Amino acid sequence: MRTTLRALSLAAAFLTVATGVEARSLLDYVGQCVPFAREASGIAIYGDAWTWWDQADGRYARGHKPRQGAVIVFAKTDRLRLGHVAVVSRVVEKRVLMLTHANWSRQNGERGHAEQDVTLYDVSPRNDWSSVKVWYRDSNGLGGGIYPVEGFIYGTGRTAPELTARNPDYVGALIDAYVPEAAAR
């Protein structure tokens, strides 16, 4: 209990500094993906998202298998000029997971908001998480883009209490991945 209260206090302090507004939860965060992922995962890496993979070398374990609490590093592309980082909130099955991140979908017409337990689908030909599709609020399903991924950075276990919901929608995540046209109905 004391650890949870301390983590919530730290998250609120972080959000007050980062946004200038006192927030009740990490999920109230509005801003860039990097500070959000750092606070949610406990992985102390700084700089643009695309630099995290190389910065983690020798400091944190890295790999290509998702684990709850790991940071997934999206590569720098024309669409993601600074890359993207997100935190794995749940592993649903071998090609589907949920992540919690900030600054992806638009909410109320603006980017930057945190999203909890959104679907990530491995579309790589070798099932190695090198290419993914991400749930996108604007289309209410998986977005049309395929994004290259560097891999996963594994932290030391200190993650934010709001990383995942009490009852995430596993079935919805599987439907998003394997029956994407169902979201349009």
Image (cartoon, rainbow, N blue to C red):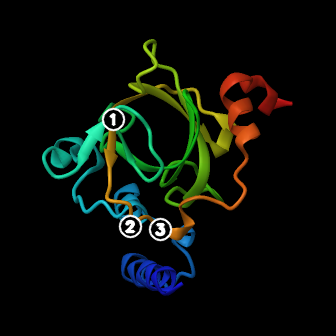
* Residue linked to disc 1: 151
Name the element at disc 2: helix
The answer to which image quadrant residue 38 occupies is bottom left
Front residue (pair 176, 70): 70
Q: Viewed as shown, does residue 154 lie left or right of 16?
A: left
Return the x and y of residue 61 as percentages of the image width and height.
24, 45
* Residue linked to disc 3: 160
- What's the distance in space between the residues labelled 1 and 3, CA to CA? 21 Å
Crowding at dot 3, Cα within 10 Å, few <14 / some 14-19 / many 20+, comes out as many
Pick out the residue farthest to the top.
125
Marks 1 and 3, the one that precedes in the sequence: 1
Return the x and y of residue 177 as percentages of the image width and height.
65, 28
Crowding at dot 2, Cα within 10 Å, few <14 / some 14-19 / many 20+, comes out as many
User: In percent of the image, x 33 and y 35: which residue is there?
Assistant: 151
- What's the distance in space between the residues labelled 2 and 3, CA to CA? 7 Å
Return the x and y of residue 73 as percentages of the image width and height.
34, 41
Residue 39, labelled with which disc?
A: 2
Proximity of marks 2 and 3: CB atoms separated by less than 8 Å:
yes
Location of the C terminus (image quadrant): top right
Marks 2 and 3, the one that precedes in the sequence: 2
Crowding at dot 1, Cα within 10 Å, few <14 / some 14-19 / many 20+, comes out as many
Amino acid type, mark 2: Glu
